């Protein structure tokens, strides 16, 4: 499935998204609840300072004692006590609010990190089970954004938004309460005007969403570009592509700048407009308030409390307005995350899959056809029978389908029609784990993981003993290499194993295949890149690996081919000839014969590439 950077199909089914998100949130419900509880006083205490202004103005500044009735008792507090107590109370509540805020931040960050991590862990677990075709179709950039950024946006912000909604709601609530207490008439006017001020926010929500989608696309391209600059740095330097890469990067950066700026252009007018509307409201309130004070309906203290509350109300209202936009973005991210969870690999274990251990009789390809893309057959009706212990060499034109054929055996891809059987059992009926345990592969381009040489070899078989490891190192002719390294077997390799030469890397891969001790060996030979001396060493290592195994080898050298029990010539997806070296030479005008004779006619050595020869041959035909 090809991933997109934009909105997923289900991004707007809110209740569906919430029900899917719930299992991730469930383990942390108690802490989230605690966080919400703590957020309430943080919000409520916003009103305290505003509220305190009223008694301060009316009693302290007006130099009046406070009389009030509490539970039937009359209480008198002198204004001088209030003068000391009110500022003290303001500081006390601020300190209390600070502590609550700290607790709230701690709980929010803790839960949001935990939720994000559990989403990431689960996404990664699903990523590693994806089919090879998934990785063929999707760039590294999009995988990075979709598997790392979305969980951050969605899970982290989700809890942050709950926090800001609760704090802002209670903040706004307490301030509105103070306003109502001061004068309900003024409060109605104030809240209505402020409400109008936030209307424009709803208008630009769609634009924000569009820009965020476009931003994702460009962000993904930038990441892919950086990755390619890293992985392809040799090609880049060799062909002086630095300028080209730079231009590409500049273009992408400009594009992301344009997206950001166009969003700013369309949305930055909002804040000043909001302020303007709010200030008109305040002007109106000041004017109307003056009348209320003069007519004795309101005290100056109440008015001071009111205006302070109104000013303070701006912030929580703005946060609430912004939250609507943020929640939209969060749901879009959630939609994309659950889309990833819904991609199911097509290559999986059948419920009644059997486990195999070892190879007893043969591997068969029966009428196998395969296509990467619909209707474009890369392999057509291939029939092969390889007995236990035999070596079959695959030769043929470049792009003919040799690598594809061997990739079908460990089920990197499944056949489109026909079947592949091991000891008579269709490989689709065998558990993936046991099937792959029985196969060791050495690829054309061998990937080494970050870590030591030992770790890289042991990846082939974590249960391998020291003795197996030693044997593998000897047979792969790695002893000398390892001795020459500063930390021997425990030398840490660079991210791509770059501190080793091509031939050395290949021998580490051979040792890795060797410790696996599996009965079937697949070799995609890539010796053309090596010089004669290292090629001879690699050849020896390969010979050791192939000993007593059932081997599929994509061979480039005549020596391997001549020694194989069977040779299959695969051209343009067809198996055109099959037989031993001697048998194939008997075929008049046979492809293999022409190829072989061409080698002799050229008078070139045994190490000459036969597959390249066939390419030329096919070109002539
Ligand atoms: N992952 C893929 N997605 C789509 N098409 C692919 C993929 N891998 C290979 N192909 C196509 O399938 C065909 C067979 O490729 P394959 O790699 O099997 O050839 P090959 O015989 O191994 O060639 P070579 O000798 O050059 O390694 C080619 O046309 C190639 O373009
Ligand atoms: Mg190949």
Image (spheres, rainbow, N blue to C red):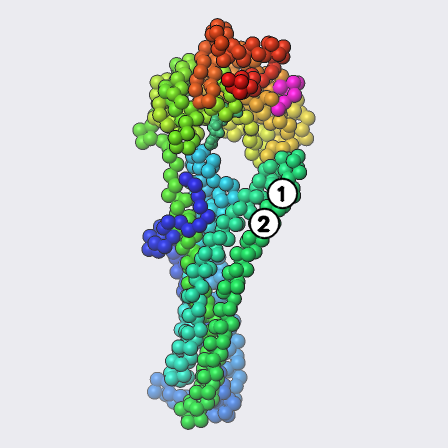
Res. 413 mark: none
Q: Is residue 405 above or below residue 449?
A: above
Instruction: Choose the circle earlier in sequence order: 1 or 2.
Output: 1
Q: Is residue 600 above or below residue 148?
A: above
| Range drawn in magenta | 529-535
Q: Could you tell me which secondary element the residue under label 2 belongs to?
A: helix
**Residue, far front:** 621
Circles 1, 2 touching at the beta carbon (< 8 Å): no
Q: Is residue 457 above or below residue 361?
A: below
Q: Position of residue 87 (x, y in %)?
A: 53, 80
Residue at the image position 44 percent from the left and 16 percent from the top:
576
Task: Give the residue number, with chain letter if any, for mark 1.
Answer: 244
Q: Check the picture and name the quadrant holding the N terminus.
A: top left
Residue 146 among those drawn in magenta: no
Q: Position of residue 362 (x, y in %)?
A: 40, 15
Q: Is mark 1 within 8 Å of ligand 1?
A: no
Compute the Cα span from label 1 to label 2: 11 Å
Let me know if residue 440 appears in the view.
no
Task: Give the residue number, with chain letter if any, for mark 2.
Answer: 251
Residue at the image position 45 percent from the left and 84 percent from the top:
284
Q: Position of residue 42 (x, y in %)?
A: 46, 69
């Amino acid at each position: 499935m090809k991933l997109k950077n934009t909105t997923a199909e289900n991004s707007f089914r809110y209740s569906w998204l919430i029900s899917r998100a719930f299992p991730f949130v469930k383990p942390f419900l108690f802490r989230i609840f605690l966080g919400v509880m703590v957020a309430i006083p943080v919000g409520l205490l916003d009103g305290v300072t505003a509220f305190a202004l009223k008694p301060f103005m009316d009693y302290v500044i007006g130099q009046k004692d406070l009389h009030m009735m509490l539970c039937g008792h009359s209480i008198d507090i002198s204004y001088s006590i209030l003068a000391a107590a009110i500022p003290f109370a303001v500081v006390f509540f601020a300190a209390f609010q600070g502590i609550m805020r700290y607790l709230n931040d701690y709980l929010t960050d803790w839960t949001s990190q935990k939720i994000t991590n559990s989403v990431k862990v689960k996404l990664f677990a699903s990523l590693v089970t994806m089919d090879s075709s998934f990785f063929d179709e999707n760039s590294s950039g999009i995988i990075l954004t979709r598997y790392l950024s979305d969980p951050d946006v969605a899970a982290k912000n989700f809890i942050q938004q709950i926090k800001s909604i609760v704090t802002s709601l209670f903040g706004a609530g307490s301030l509105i309460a103070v306003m109502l207490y001061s004068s309900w008439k003024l409060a109605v006017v104030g809240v209505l005007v402020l409400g109008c001020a936030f209307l424009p926010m709803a208008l630009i929500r769609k634009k924000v969403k569009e820009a965020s989608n476009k931003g994702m696309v460009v962000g993904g391209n930038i990441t892919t570009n950086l990755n390619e600059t890293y992985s392809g740095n040799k090609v880049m330097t060799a062909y002086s592509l630095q300028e080209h890469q730079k231009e590409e990067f500049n273009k992408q950066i400009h594009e992301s700048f344009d997206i950001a700026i166009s969003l700013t252009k369309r949305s930055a007018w909002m804040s000043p407009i909001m302020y303007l509307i709010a200030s008109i409201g305040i002007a109106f309130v000041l004017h109307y308030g003056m009348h209320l004070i003069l007519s004795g309906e309101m005290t100056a203290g109440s008015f001071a409390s009111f205006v302070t509350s109104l000013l303070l109300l701006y912030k929580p209202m703005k946060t609430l307005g912004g939250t609507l936009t943020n929640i939209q973005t969060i749901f879009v991210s959630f939609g994309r995350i659950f889309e990833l969870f819904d991609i199911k690999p097509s290559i999986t274990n059948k419920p009644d899959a059997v486990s195999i251990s070892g190879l007893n009789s043969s591997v068969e390809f029966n009428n196998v056809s395969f296509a990467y893309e619909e209707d474009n057959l890369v392999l057509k009706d291939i029939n092969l029978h390889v007995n236990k212990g035999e070596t079959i060499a695959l030769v043929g034109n470049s792009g003919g389908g040799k690598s594809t054929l061997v990739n079908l055996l460990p089920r990197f891809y499944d056949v489109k029609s026909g079947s592949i059987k091991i000891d008579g059992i269709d490989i689709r009926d065998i558990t993936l784990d046991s099937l792959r345990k029985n196969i060791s592969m050495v690829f054309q381009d061998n990937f080494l993981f970050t870590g030591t040489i030992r770790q890289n070899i042991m990846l082939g078989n974590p249960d391998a003993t020291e003795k197996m490891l030693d044997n593998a190192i000897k047979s792969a002719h790695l002893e000398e290499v390892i001795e020459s390294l500063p930390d021997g077997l425990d030398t840490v390799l660079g991210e791509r194993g770059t501190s080793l030469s091509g031939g050395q890397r290949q021998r580490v891969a051979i040792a890795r295949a060797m410790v696996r001790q599996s009965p079937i060996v697949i070799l995609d030979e890539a010796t053309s890149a090596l010089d004669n001396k290292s090629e001879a060493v690699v050849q020896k290592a390969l010979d050791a690996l192939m000993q007593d195994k059932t081997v599929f080898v994509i061979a480039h050298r005549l020596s391997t081919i001549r020694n194989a029990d069977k040779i299959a010539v695969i051209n343009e997806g067809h198996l055109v000839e099959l037989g031993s070296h001697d048998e194939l030479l008997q075929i008049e005008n046979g492809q293999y014969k022409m190829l072989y004779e061409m080698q002799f006619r050229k008078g070139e050595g045994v190490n000459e590439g036969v597959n390249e020869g066939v390419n030329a041959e096919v070109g002539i035909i």
